[in-house]
Amino acid sequence: MVLNSTGHRKKTWVLFMMLILCMAGLMIRIGYIMIFESSYYEGKAKEIQERERIISGIRGDILDRNGNVIAVNETAYNISVIHNQISDEEKVIEVLSGELGIDEEKVRKRVEKVSSIEKIKNNVSKEMGEKILSYNLDGVKVDESSIRYYPNNELFSKVIGFAGSDGQGVVGLETVYDKLLSGTPGKILTTCDGRGIEVEGFEEKRIAPGKGKNLITTLDVNIQKVCMEKAKEAYEVNRADGVSIIAMNPKNGEIYAMVDYPEYDLNDPFEGEDLNSMWRNSCVSDTYEPGSTFKIITASIALEENLVTLDERFYCPGYIVVEDRRIRCHKTAGHGSESFVEGIQNSCNPVFIDLGLRIGSDRYYDYFKKFGLLDKTGIDLPGEAGTIMHEKDKIGQVELATIAFGQSFQITPVQLMTTVSSLINGGTRIVPHIGMAESENNGKTVKFEYENKEGICSEKTSQTMRMLLESVVSEGSGKNAAVEGYEIGGKTATSQTFPRSDNIYIASFLGFYPADDPQIMYLVKINNPKDAYYGGTIAAPVAAELFKETIPYISTLRNDDE
């Protein structure tokens, strides 16, 4: 009995000591948590007690080269509901559906849904947000936010694009530079009890959203307005399907203006039937047969390879036969005997077909690569299309003949301008671009760098091409683009779309000023004009108006390489 009693006491003592140790361990652990991990658990408690509503970041502004704002933010409101806090569901449904113009059943589903928070509508106007607030409805949250606003409405629409209701870029520059422009999200924190009901006496905490960086572009509002006006006039006068005008600096690739008329209202971008077509920028995303403007490239190759001299004579009877194909000149009666200079002034197809056959498929392809025609330009706009060209081993004599004067293959307008720029600027392949710099809210500005490629052609060839193209405007087929007192170089073109039987034409003119040292280049492209359709007749005069109105202004432009 004594032994058993002693053993029992020992067991009790061991158990007691174990309990003491456990309690000591718990106290040490509690003390550790209270002293060293208090902030962590305090945060966890706040997460349970605080309801979080996200505020979208504020997008940075987009500006033209002169500091004019072309995309900015305006105050807006986001409307949402919290089911557990609603005291009168029917009143909430009635007010929100009526004031916001949303179907009653859609509002009802969201109001009756038991969740932490349900969005009703984002980016409503300041006036509407304040009106909803005035009803003082329990469970209805009206949170201040921002909405993208475009002061110039249609101006630059197919270049800038727009941002959606979620604050992200959808098309255009808004999507290409989305990461740069996007701000940091903010929060609204509300203290709630275990049922999700707001606790009285606790004010909401607001963590303000941050603003993204600003984008400074090469665009110029003044030049764009002139281009827009002239595009609209050409569109209406020629009853065309569309008119595209691009203004670019051929020395460094800065895009001053880009119009693809008709455009759309950036502040109401969903008002239309075929939105993809409406938003599409054909200057970058659509290819076409360039026609006679491509003769600039054929002539440059021939000069580089010493395959022709300026005074070499040709004869044009109005056509040329290649294999079994009779290919006519635009002047069916023929130009007769003419020099190479006269051939380019007359835009004579037989002359350039002769040059194309001399060049041959191998050399043509080599120069297509050298000039960058087989690659995309790298312009900072979405959806750039690539050149559609024959495979090298499928270029026969007939294909050579048609390529020589700009048919049977397709390129984009911006590709044509980029390639021709390298042939008249001394031989530098530039990168066409719109982004010039990023600017932080503290005023710090960082310029963008673009990698140009030198040695595309010799300075001699470039100088000769400038002289030849000036003579096209002063003496040849481009005379309707001439402006008294100014030396302008350029080339007209008239091409057809497929199928040829539809008789749908594209009239265009590519020109630059000044002819001896180009500072600005224009491409005017008129799609499917209903009456006259020759580039020299309807596109060249548009270019003349553009030069006349903008030449006095060009010297004031600030270049991004200065």
Image (cartoon, helix red, strand yellow):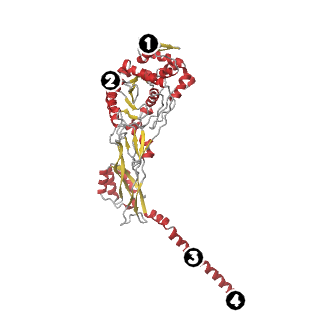
Mark 2 = which residue?
485
Query: Residue 184's spot in the image, x, y percent?
Result: 43, 52
Closest to the camera, between mark 2 and mark 3, is 2
Q: First in sequence: mark 1 or mark 3?
A: 3
Give the spatial CA distance, label 1 vs label 4.
137 Å
| Residue contact between numbered discs 2 and 3, judged by CB atoms under 8 Å | no
| Labels 4 & 3 near each other (Cβ < 8 A) | no
Q: Which mark is residue 46?
A: none
Q: Earlier in the sequence, mark 2 or mark 3?
A: 3
Q: Nearer the viewer, residue 15 or 63?
A: 63
Q: Are marks 1 and 3 in contact (CB under 8 Å)?
A: no
Given residues 16 and 440, the one toward you in this image is 440
Mark 2 → mark 3, Cα distance in angstroms: 99 Å
Q: Quarter holding the C terminus?
A: top left
168 relative to 273, above or below: below
Which amino acid, mark 3? Ala
Mark 2 or 1 closer to N-term?
A: 1
Are there few (<14), some (14-19), or many (20+) residues within 10 Å of tag 4? Answer: few
Q: Which residue is mark 3?
A: 24
Name the residue beneath numbered marker 1.
338
Q: Does dot 2 land on a helix, a strand or a loop? A: loop
Which residue matches tag 4?
A: 2
The disc labelled 4 sits on which kind of residue? Val
Mark 1 vs 4, N-terminal side: 4
Q: Position of residue 234 (x, y in %)?
A: 33, 27
Asked which secondary structure carries label 1, the reply is strand
Q: In front here: 242 or 309?
A: 309
Single out the mark in the foreground, 2 or 1: 2
